[in-house]
Image: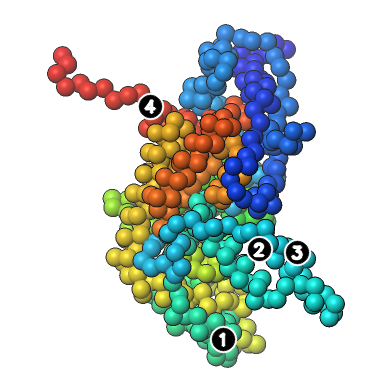
Amino acid sequence: MATSPSHLLLRRLSATVSKRASNVAVCRTTSISRSPSAYAFTPTSHLLLTNDNCRRFKSTAVEVEDTPEAADIMGTPEKLNLAVLADKIDKEEVLDYTSDKNKSGTPSPWAVFDAWGAGGDIKPYLSTDEEAKLSPESVLIPMNDGERESVPDETDILGVYNKLLKHRSSNHFGYPYNLMFDHGELYDFMKYSINNLGDPYVTSNYGVHSRQFERAVIDFFARLWKIPEDEFWGYVTTCGTEGNLHGVLLARECHPDGILYSSKETHYSIFKAARYYRMDAKSIPTLAMGEIDYDALASEISKNLDRPVIVNVNIGTTVKGAVDNLDRILRILKNLGVPRERFHIHCDGALFAMMMPFVDFAPEVSFEKPIDSIAVSGHKMLGCPMPCGITISRKEHVKKVEQKIEYLNSVDTTIMGSRNGQAPLYLWYSLRKKGLEGIKQDVTHCMETAVYLRDKITAAGLSCRLNDLSCTVVLERPMDDEFVKRWQLACEEDIAHVVVMPNVTRQKIDTFVEELSEVVERCGRIEATRPDSPLVRLNCSSWGGSSESPVVDLKGRK
C-alpha cells in the first residue's frame, strides 16, 4: 500500500531530527568551578552516552526520500522551522490509562521574611575537602570503635551540610518551593513529638497534638475558597500528592463506576491514584500551552454517558503552569446533559490555587461552583521546612470513608494514620505573620518577576513562553548539563522551566541569563527531539506572543 504524503512527511521529519540530533553534542564545560560529582546527571530514555562523554538525543527513525512538502516545513537545512511544524501536529489520541500503562502525566511564593538570605547573593560551593565530609564513607553510621575513629565528627559533617544547603538554596530556580521563610520562633517546638493522628475534628486520647492550629489553617482555606462553615471538611496533608490521593478516593467512593478524566500533562499523582484505586481513567490530550483539549474531553465524555464523570481540573500544570478552564469544563458537562449527581470535580491546585485568589481579574476557583475538592501544597507557596499540603472537601463526601477507630478514640478519615503535627503549626505561623496583604505582595512579586525573566530570555534570542496565569517560565533546554544542575532546572525532553518564587530576584535572573547566553555561545542550541516534541509545541502560535504575526497599526489607513 502506498504511503500517504502526511505519513511520509512525518517520517521525513523524524529522520531529519534524528540525523541532526546525532550531530549536536551536549557540551560539558570546566569554566564553572564546581566539582563534577556535584552535577551528576542521570540520562533519560531520550538520551544516550557516546564515546566522547557527550550526550546526544536518540531516535530510531528511518531515512526516507525528500519531498517538497517536507522541504516547505523544514526550511533551511541548518534549522528546523519549529513554529510552522508546531501548527502541523496531528490530533492526539485519548489514552485509556486503565489499559495503557505508558507514561501519562508529568513527573514531578511568597516573601515577607528571609531566615538566612535565600533571596540574597549566590552562596559559595564546597571545597574538595568539604565535599569529602559528605561522602558515603564519611556519613557511614559506625558499628564499632574502629569505624567510629575513621569518620568525621557529626558536628563537622552537619556544618558542611549546612553550607551545601545554603549554596543549593541560593541558586534554586527549577522547582516551586518558596525558600524565603523564618520560623525561628517555632524551633523550640521541634523537641516535642506532635502527632495529629486521626481526624482533625475528633480529638484522640493522644494529647501532644496541634489540632487547634490545623483547624485554623483549614478554616482559612475554606474561607479563601468560599465554602460555608457547615459544609466543608479538610486536613493538613504530608504533600500535594496526598491531597490528590484523598480527593480522588472520595470521587471513587461517591461514584464507584465513574471514569476519571484528566489531561496528559497532569501531575503523576492523579494517575497514581487511579492505579491504586483500580479506576478507569482517560489521559486527555492537551493544547500547546498545556491546558486540557476541551473538544477531546467533550468527545470522550460523550462516548461514556452511561457512567459517572470524574474530572481532575489542573490549577497550574507541573511543567507549563497551565490552568484548565473550570467554567468551560462545567459548560461541557451541562451541554452534554450530565446532572450534578453524576459528576465529581477535583481541583489539583498544588501551586497556583493558592495564588489565584490574589491575582487581579483572575477567574474564580471556589466551592460556589459545583466542585467537590481542592488540594494544594503548603510548602510551595507559603514556604515550610517540611513538605506539607492542605485538602478541602465537601463534608458530605467524607462520610463515605469515615470509620470509628476505638484504639485512637477518633475516626479514620485521612490517608495517613499518624500525621505530622509540626506542619500545621508552621503553616498557621506563616499565615498569621503574612496575612492577606503579605500573600498578595508575594504573588505580585512572582508574577511580575516571571514576566521579567521571560522578556530577558526572549531578548537573548531563545525560545521562551509564560502562560498568563502562571509564574512558570518555559524555555528550550540548555545544552550544558552542569548549567542545568547548577541552577536545578526541571527538564522534560527538550524543554526546561524556571518557577519564579519569592527567592528568585532580578539580580539572580540577570546572572542566570548571562550564564545561559554563554552556554548557548559555547554549546549551541538544542534541536527538537521529534516532530511533536515539547520544544515544537513551545513554538506553537496558539501561545500568542513572539510566534504571532506582528500587530499592524491601522491608524490613518483607508
Work out how far the residue at label 3 is from the one at label 2, CA to CA, in angstroms.
Answer: 13 Å
| Tag 2 near tag 4, CB within 8 Å | no
Quarter of image, res 94: top right
From the image, tell me which residue sits under label 1: 192
| Front residue of this view, candidates 4 and 28 | 28
> Of discs 3 and 1, which sits in the foreground?
3
From the image, tell me which residue sits under label 4: 548
Q: Amino acid at mark 4?
A: Glu
Work out how far the residue at label 3 is from the one at label 1, CA to CA, in angstroms.
Answer: 30 Å
Work out how far the residue at label 2 is from the one at label 4, CA to CA, in angstroms.
Answer: 51 Å
Sequence order check: which comes first, mark 3 or mark 1?
3
**Residue found 79% across the figure and 77% down from its top:** 148
Which quadrant of the figure contains the N terminus?
top right
Q: Amino acid at mark 3?
A: Pro
From the image, tell me which residue sits under label 2: 130
**Residue found 84% across the figure and 81% down from its top:** 145
How is the protein colored in the picture? rainbow
Please say if 179 is above or below 457.
below
100 vs 187, left or right, is right
| Mark 3 residue element | loop
Viewer can see residue 393: no
Work out how far the residue at label 1 is from the one at label 2, CA to CA, in angstroms.
Answer: 32 Å
The dot on residue 94 is none
| Tag 3 near tag 1, CB within 8 Å | no
Viewer can see residue 480: yes
Please say if 181 is above or below 69.
below
From the image, tell me which residue sits under label 3: 136
| Mark 1 residue element | loop
Q: Position of residue 18 (x, y in %)?
A: 67, 25
